Image: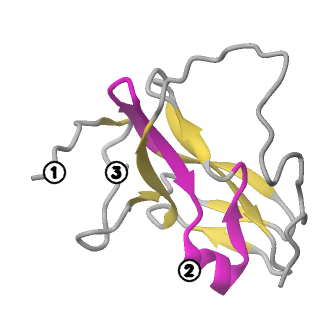
Amino acid sequence: MLECPTVKVQKLSADARMPEMAHRGDSGFDLFASETVQLKPGERKLVSTGLKMEMPEGLEAQVRPKSGLAINHGISVLNTPGTIDSCYRGEVKVIMVNFSEKEFLVEKGSKIAQAVFAKVECPILEEAKELNETKRSAGGFGSTGLK
């Protein structure tokens, strides 16, 4: 059976909404706005969730856009995925952006993003004078073509 870590969530007001999974098996928990915010075309704003989280060390929360907001309204999340570190204890806020040509009203209590929890690896970084060559080597952006 899958062992799940415990994440403590503190509501900063009585009407703040706890993160929710819409369906069993979803990877993300919906995050909800705790305030009403107007987003003009091209504008970005920090939107409050009214929540704080405490995660065990070795876990992070990644804040990601909602696909329905993106395709239906041109609304997304900047700094995607945003990272909430296990040592952070401040309010969880979402950087929302309006890529559409119309104003968009983020209503209090509406879904604004999703949080996906992921394990964090702890590598040891070692300075090196040389790195092993690979077939790809330094081939970067677009080096494999589109077809």
Where does residue 119 sit, x and y in percent of width and height? Answer: 41, 39
Count of marks, rendered view: 3
**Which label's residue is closer to the chain start, 2 or 3?**
3
Q: Is residue 109 magenta?
A: no
Viewer-side residue, 139 vs 9: 139
The amino acid beneath tag 1 is Leu
Q: Do residues under tags 2 and 1 come within 8 Å of each other at their CB atoms?
A: no
Q: Residues within 10 Å of mark 2 (few under 14, many from 20)?
A: few
Q: Residues within 10 Å of mark 3 (few under 14, many from 20)?
A: few
Q: Do residues under tags 3 and 1 come within 8 Å of each other at their CB atoms?
A: no
Where does residue 107 sit, x and y in percent of width and height? Answer: 54, 67
Viewer-side residue, 18 vs 62: 62
**Which label's residue is closer to the chain start, 2 or 1?**
1
Gap in angstroms between the C-alphas marked 2 and 3: 24 Å
Residue identifier under label 2: 68
Q: Residues within 10 Å of mark 1 (few under 14, many from 20)?
A: few
Viewer-side residue, 79 vs 132: 132
Seen in the image, is 60 located left or right of residue 94?
left
Residue identifier under label 1: 2
Residue 7 sits above or below residue 123 on the image: below
Residue stretch rendered in magenta on the structure: 50-79
Look at 9% across and 53% down and name the residue there: 1
Seen in the image, is 115 located left or right of residue 55?
right
Q: Quadrant of residue 8?
A: top left
Q: Quadrant of residue 125?
A: top right
Gap in angstroms between the C-alphas marked 3 and 1: 32 Å
Residue identifier under label 3: 15
Between marks 2 and 3 in the image, the one whose residue lies nearer the viewer: 2
Q: Which image quarter holds the C terminus?
A: bottom right
